[in-house]
């Protein structure tokens, strides 16, 4: 399997304060990695190192096997979709202009193609066509987040960085978006790094889950392994509740040790 | 007063309209240059933060230079007239422009900039697609302030011979026409308010987001731009300089009248056309350099002033030095004196007629014996000046009973009411022609002579010998009294300088 992203012995410090220490990790192409960890543990920092917004104090980042220090960061970034924590849309642009921002950087000429891409992505994230002309200030927080996601996906990047993209949407929409994202991932084979605070979401979406605490990896494994063999107390605590929740089809609910009244079945 | 102003305005609406347009042209040109140049500088220093501090420092410093000294400072480089005005206005407009651009560009939420960067925008793309549009509201409010300020400040530009509504203000002040001054000031205020309203409207339109509004905005802004360009273009068209005589005058009522006389006669008797720039601030000290650089061809001047200020001679000028004056002007400046009008605008003493008759006083010396009974009035500074009160008394052995300092405008009232008996005057004071006073002869030559004539560049006189005829006609035709009467007609009776000039020429049989 080819490696899409590699962290090689990464250390990041702000002054004397070490935020990330000795982070080594490799992500295969087409992997959907969910990242979870306590607030301030360095998730966003790790994400921003991939597209070169933050430079590591020590160590190297490889994307597609190439050290990004030797790469043109502008070109690199255009191939990495980035859904920012808190969405951060451009306030002076309409929804349409926001979503077509990266496609426009890439190809200014093909307006028709961009336009149809914008429509497609807006539909996927569940926004009405009539929202196109609105400005971010005229949208709800959840709607803004969805525009942010559409914007990250609009240029069909090879890698997608998502920083708590579903934080501000309601439970039901979130469920729909999760399904959509999973489908996009399966259809396109895109590599995704996805930060979340919701262990359920992390387990459900990720082909692999990265658990971090205080800038150090606690465990990096498939969801199943995380549930069955938590590597540290931190991970154990984190998955404790999830272990009692059964993600099983209706007809097999009885197979679950912890099923019954306490078992909330989430359809996949 | 208001009515007065209104009638002045109606009467001279062509003049005011012309001045208004000129005012707009000068200010708009400065505003455009400042927006363009200041905007670019503002953007550059916000992109390269290290340069921001020194640049803003320099511009701040320029901003603190008083406008009058800025204009004076620029004259040697860019001469007198609109160019200097535009440069000075631009310099003042730069600071608010650079500062608001810099503030707007550097106060953008860094998270948004990081988002733009993270999406793969180049630095230029961030600048044009994100920073500039987001900074626009701040920049625009800076522009709004700057525009109002520039329009107001442009009023000062007439001080150095530039056009615009300041001309009305300045002329009103020098010819004692308050209604004119007020009308000019009011128009400037209205113009500034109007521009502010327009910009406010633009600001509001820019906040409108709908696609339709954007389209309308685009159409409106293109129309406005074209209009402005047409106006500036129109103003820059070279007004055929060939065979146009450039005449300047100093900011004094009588010079306005003399300027008009020259204008009327030259255009009547020759094929030349005249461009008359009236009332240049700073008088000789600004006109002489402009004569030297060839910007002006002719201006009325006084012999004593030429002697002291241009040739920089020490000591008292008397008319037997005229030949020296003439030859030094020819040798040093290639200019000459021509068309001596005949009147002498110098300092003098006047006594209430009743006293003059009673004691038979004709000269300063005649005052000696009775000065102990007389009250002497003069402006405050006459008592302070070296060649003032003390020197006068010493020369003529005078000793007055009492002295009073009073404002120049009040002296004539005071002498009429008998509050003072003797006072200092200028020999062509308009008030003199209607006051019941006798002007005395300076028999010991205490004051220098200030005969009025014209200074002309020899080159111009050689090229257009027909001008000589005109100056011959004008030689010796205006007495002190004549000039005083014309000054009175303009300053007190509210006549236009041109009217007064025309009436005099008519009387002298010089009009065809
Ligand atoms: N520019 C900076 N200077 C100093 N410290 C910083 C800076 N940026 C981030 N940090 C610190 O680095 C640590 C990691 O920050 P990071 O944003 O990666 O956390 P996070 O895991 O994304 O947290 P959250 O879940 O709250 O988003 C935090 O303790 C934060 O205070
Ligand atoms: Mg974060």
Image (cartoon, helix red, strand yellow):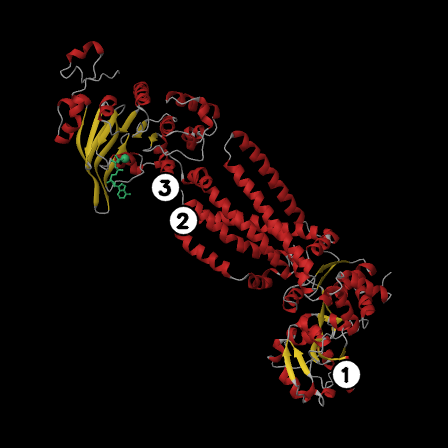
What residue lies at 54% left-to-right and 43% top-to-bottom?
B200
| Residue furthest out toward the top | A251
Q: Chain of mark 3?
A: B
- x, y percentage for residue B201? 56, 40
Q: Is residue B92 above or below residue B376?
A: above
Q: How far is the residue under mark 3 from the one under mark 1?
A: 85 Å
Q: Is residue B481 visible?
A: yes
Task: Count neighbours of disc 3 (C-alpha within 10 A) and say few if under 14, some if 14 to 19, many if 20 or more.
Answer: few
- x, y percentage for residue B177? 70, 61
Q: Quadrant of the C terminus of chain B?
A: bottom right
Q: Secondary structure at mark 1?
A: helix
Question: Mark 1 — residue?
Answer: B356
- Label 3 vs 1, first from the N-terminus: 3
Q: How far is the residue under mark 3 from the one under mark 2?
A: 16 Å
Q: Which of these two is toward me, B409 or A38? A: B409
Pointers 3 and 2 within a single chain: yes
| Left or right, A110 with reference to B109 | right
Question: Mark 3 — residue?
Answer: B110
Q: Residue B336 appears in which quarter of the rendering? A: bottom right
Q: Quadrant of the N terminus of chain B?
A: bottom right
| Left or right, B275 with reference to B220 | right
- Contact, CB < 8 Å: mark 3 with mark 1? no
Task: Count neighbours of disc 1 (C-alpha within 10 A) and say few if under 14, some if 14 to 19, many if 20 or more.
Answer: many
Return the mark for residue B48: 2
- Contact, CB < 8 Å: mark 3 with mark 2? no
- Label 2 vs 1, first from the N-terminus: 2
Q: Which of these two is toward me, B10 or B103? A: B10
Q: Is residue A14 above or below residue A6?
A: below
Q: How far is the residue under mark 2 from the one under mark 1?
A: 78 Å
Pointers 2 and 1 within a single chain: yes
Q: Secondary structure at mark 3?
A: helix
């Amino acid at each position: 399997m080819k490696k899409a992203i590699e962290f090689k012995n990464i250390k990041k410090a702000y002054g004397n304060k070490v935020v990330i220490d000795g982070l080594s990790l490799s992500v295969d192409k087409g992997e959907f990695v969910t990242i979870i960890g306590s607030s301030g543990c360095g998730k966003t920092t790790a994400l921003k190192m991939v597209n070169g917004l933050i430079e590591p104090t020590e160590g190297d980042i490889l994307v597609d096997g190439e050290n990004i220090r030797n790469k043109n960061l502008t070109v690199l970034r255009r191939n990495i979709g980035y859904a920012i924590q808190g969405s951060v849309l451009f306030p002076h642009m309409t929804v349409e202009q926001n979503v077509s921002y990266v496609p426009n950087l890439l190809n200014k000429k093909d307006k028709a193609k961009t336009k149809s891409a914008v429509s497609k992505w807006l539909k996927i994230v569940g926004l009405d066509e009539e929202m196109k002309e609105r400005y971010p200030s005229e949208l709800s927080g959840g709607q803004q987040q969805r525009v942010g996601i559409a914007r990250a996906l609009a240029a069909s990047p090879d890698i997608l960085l998502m920083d708590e993209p579903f934080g501000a949407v309601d439970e039901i929409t979130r469920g729909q978006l999760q399904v959509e994202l999973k489908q996009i991932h399966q259809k396109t084979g895109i590599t995704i790094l996805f930060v979340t605070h919701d262990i359920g979401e992390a387990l459900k979406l990720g082909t692999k889950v990265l658990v971090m605490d205080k800038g150090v990896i606690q465990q990096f494994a498939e969801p199943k392994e995380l549930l069955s063999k938590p590597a540290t107390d931190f991970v154990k605590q984190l998955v404790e509740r999830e272990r009692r929740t059964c993600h099983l089809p209706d007809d097999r609910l009885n197979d679950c040790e912890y099923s019954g009244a306490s078992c909330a079945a989430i359809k996949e | 007063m208001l009515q007065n102003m209104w009638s002045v305005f109606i009467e001279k609406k062509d003049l005011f309209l012309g001045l208004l347009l000129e005012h707009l042209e000068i200010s708009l040109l400065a505003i455009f240059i400042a927006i363009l140049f200041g905007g670019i500088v503002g953007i550059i220093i916000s992109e390269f933060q290290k340069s921001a501090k020194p640049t803003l420092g320099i511009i701040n410093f320029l901003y603190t230079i008083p406008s009058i000294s800025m204009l004076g400072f620029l004259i040697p480089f860019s001469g007198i007239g609109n160019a200097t005005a535009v440069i000075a206005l631009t310099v003042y407009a730069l600071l608010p422009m650079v500062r608001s651009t810099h503030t707007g560009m550097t106060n953008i939420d860094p998270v948004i900039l990081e988002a733009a960067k993270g999406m793969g925008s180049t630095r230029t793309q961030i600048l044009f697609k994100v920073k500039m549009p987001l900074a626009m509201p701040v920049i625009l409010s800076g522009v709004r302030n700057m525009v109002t300020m520039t329009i107001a400040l442009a009023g000062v530009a007439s001080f150095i011979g530039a056009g615009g509504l300041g001309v009305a203000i300045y002329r009103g002040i020098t010819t004692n026409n308050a209604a004119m001054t007020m009308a000019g000031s009011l128009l400037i205020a209205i113009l500034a308010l109007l521009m502010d309203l327009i910009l406010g409207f633009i600001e509001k339109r820019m906040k409108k987001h709908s696609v339709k509004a954007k389209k309308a905005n685009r159409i409106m802004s293109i129309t406005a731009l074209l209009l402005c360009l047409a106006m500036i273009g129109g103003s820059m068209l070279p007004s055929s300089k060939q065979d146009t005589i450039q005449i300047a005058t100093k900011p004094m009522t009588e010079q306005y009248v003399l300027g008009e006389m020259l204008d009327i006669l030259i255009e009547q008797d020759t094929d030349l056309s005249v461009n008359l720039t009236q009332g240049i601030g700073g008088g000789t000290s600004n006109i002489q350099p402009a004569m030297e650089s060839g910007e002006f061809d002719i201006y009325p001047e006084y012999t004593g002033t030429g002697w002291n200020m241009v040739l920089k001679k020490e000591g008292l000028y008397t008319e037997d030095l005229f030949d020296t004056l003439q030859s030094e002007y020819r040798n040093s400046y290639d200019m000459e004196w021509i068309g001596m009008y005949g009147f002498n605008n110098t300092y003098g003493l006047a006594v209430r007629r009743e006293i003059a008759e009673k004691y038979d006083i004709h000269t300063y010396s005649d005052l000696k014996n009775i000065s102990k009974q007389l009250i002497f009035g003069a402006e405050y500074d006459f008592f302070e000046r070296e060649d003032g009160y003390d020197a006068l008394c010493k020369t003529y052995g005078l000793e007055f009973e009492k002295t009073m300092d009073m404002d120049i405008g009040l002296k004539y009232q005071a002498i009429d009411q008998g509050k003072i008996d003797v006072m200092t005057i200028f020999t062509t004071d308009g008030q003199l022609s209607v006051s019941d006073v006798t002007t005395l002869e300076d028999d010991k030559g205490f004051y220098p002579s200030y005969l009025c004539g014209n200074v002309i560049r020899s080159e111009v006189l050689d090229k257009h010998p027909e001008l000589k005829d005109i100056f011959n006609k004008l030689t010796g035709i205006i007495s002190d009294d004549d000039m005083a009467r014309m000054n009175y007609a303009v300053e007190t009776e509210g006549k236009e300088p041109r009217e007064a000039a025309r009436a005099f020429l008519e009387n002298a049989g010089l009009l065809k």
